[in-house]
Amino acid sequence: MSAMAGDGQSADGIDPGRRLIRLDDGGRSLGEKLADRFRYLVWRTPLHRLRLRGKFPLKLVAVPEDPIPGDPVRGTALLEGRALFHNEQIALADLDFGALEASAGFTDYLQSFEWLRDLDAAGTREEATPVAERLMRNWLSNWADRVSESSWRADMWGQRVLLWASHAPLILSSGDLVYRSDVLNTLARGARHLDRAAMKAPIGIHQVRAWSGVVAAGLLVQGGDARTARGEAGLARALSQTLTADGGMVCRSPAAQLALVETLAMLRSAYDVRRVEFPAPFASALSYAVPALMGATLGDGGLSSWQGGGPSYPRRVAAAIEASGQRALPLKNARDWGYQRLQSGDSIVLMDAAPPPAQRLESGGCASTLAFELSHGPHRIVVNCGGAVGSAIPQDFAQRLRTTAAHSTLVVGDSNSTALNPDGSLGKGVVEVEMERSDRDGIARIAASHDGYVRRYGFIHRRRIALSAEGDELQGEDILEPEGKKQADDTGFAVRFHLSPDIEVTPAGEGTGALLRIPGGPAWHFRCRGASVQIDASVWIDEKVRACPSKQLVLGGVAPPGGATLGWSFKRAG
């Protein structure tokens, strides 16, 4: 994603000249896209069906535990005859795996069989097995012998292998030997498909899931010793391409980071049930990935909202960390991954201090450079609007959630610091971010800048923030500094602070401040200098992907050719 310069650290704890540069990879080429389409077409041919032939396994070698807890609410809905996913639902009587009409996220939830863990969490085996078998028969009748991109994606099969094996009692307890044979034979065919497809999966969580499925199939399906060795080599290579030096994912998505930790935790369970040592490269990846994941959480234990991901359930984040077997502290200075964590007292600040991910690594990334989120205890105060990629939220609205204006940062000319391409990728904009950090005398300070507005408006955006030793005050300054040859006579800009939906906001200080009241928490004063503050409507996407009405503080202004400076602070009132 980035190149870095200035590696040393001075005696006062400041990283001098720390610079992250976004490499312009141009996105995926036309040739690569055509190669993908050709490969998907080959999957449908008799040749590929011949490749999937092989011995029929008679049983699983072992049944691992699923270390990730299911959602009892979704599981209860399944027992009642409804598939539930966030704010969408389908009656099981109407569910047809061959013609799913649902959002991308809901479709993946159903196709991956993630619902098995929810069903397992909601009822006894006697209650859950008939529902699981019914849905399995539905899927087999549509896709067991029909290979397609929608149902045989490599990452999807990787999840399926792990979930079918972990929840085998729900899908393999039937006395119908023909049905049992169909399930096991389809599992073996899926593993043979992964043998060829895993290496072609996109770098990131897709490839990690695919190779994890290869390894799990080698451990749990009869005759898989050679597959295990090949899968371990492939997964080690995928992890080395997916994780930065400090353990964050190159796509810079905390939601994807959570998925990676969950996947490796499930794979670890497969090794445990076989009494085989978890390979050192995978254990090492977890030892770096877990602190990075913890570093992206706020005071309520849920994830901070970055790169199209939402807050996630604190319970699920905690379960993934527990299942990983790692004991660690949150990573504060994730220089390569790009998130900076300031933590004092009961307050936590998370700042995006790196360029956006490269075009080929993320479809759904956000123009969020130098934005931050703030929490105090379990209460979120300053937030980003959040992500809704793949949800039932209308696509045009989901696109707006990716804009710079949907994040708590400065916007110049009502434009994005990095362009959003129509295909979902990120285009040109921020190339270079400079960042310095100091943790001295109990005060955590960050000074960062980005060049996303230089080419269009001739300004560098600099942001400085400092969190007090007690965590009761966050001070900040936003600067537009002239750079290059192009400066307009007057350039409009706005600094936005999106607020959590439960915060009540009232004006204060004759247009230079506001009072933020938090139910069950202390009030906070907001003050600014160099501009007046307006209170506008906003929105926040919660863990159930619901658009919750909220407010935002907006500091508007016009920058002359010489630039502009705005100061502001959030201070606890009691």
Image (spheres, rainbow, N blue to C red):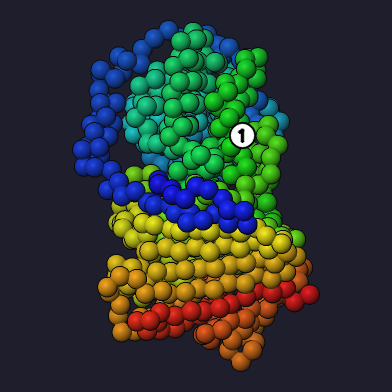
Secondary structure category for the residue under label 1: helix
- Residue 406 lies left or right of residue 175; in this view the side is left
What is the three-letter code of the residue carrying label 1? Ser
Residue 261: x and y in percent read 58, 36
Residue located at (27% from left, 48% from top): 26
* Residue under the image location 24 percent in, 42 percent down: 29
User: Is 192 placed above or below 469 here?
Assistant: above
Where in the figure is residue 18, as x and y percent of width and height?
48, 54
Q: Number of labelled discs?
A: 1
Q: Would residue 60 appear left or right of 398 to someone viewing this image?
A: right
* 127 vs 290: above or below: above
Q: Would residue 559 be found to the left or right of residue 126 on screen?
A: left
Q: Is residue 387 visible?
A: no
- In this orientation, which residue lies closer to the viewer: 304 or 397? 304
User: Residue at 47% across / 74% down in the picture?
Assistant: 479
557 and 301: which one is in front? 557
Residue furthest to the front? 11
- In the image: residue 89, left or right of residue 403: right
Residue underneath mark 1: 287
Rendered location of residue 107, percent (x, y): 45, 42
Q: Nearer the viewer, residue 399 or 76?
A: 399
Say which quarter of the image contains residue 441: bottom right
Residue 81 in the image: state x and y as whole percent.
58, 41
Is 407 situated above or below 391?
below
Residue that appears at 62% across and 75% down: 569
- Tell me the quadrant of the picture where the C terminus can be found: bottom right
**Picture quadrant where residue 427 is located:** bottom left
Disc 1: CA contacts within 10 A as few (<14), some (14-19) or many (>=20): some
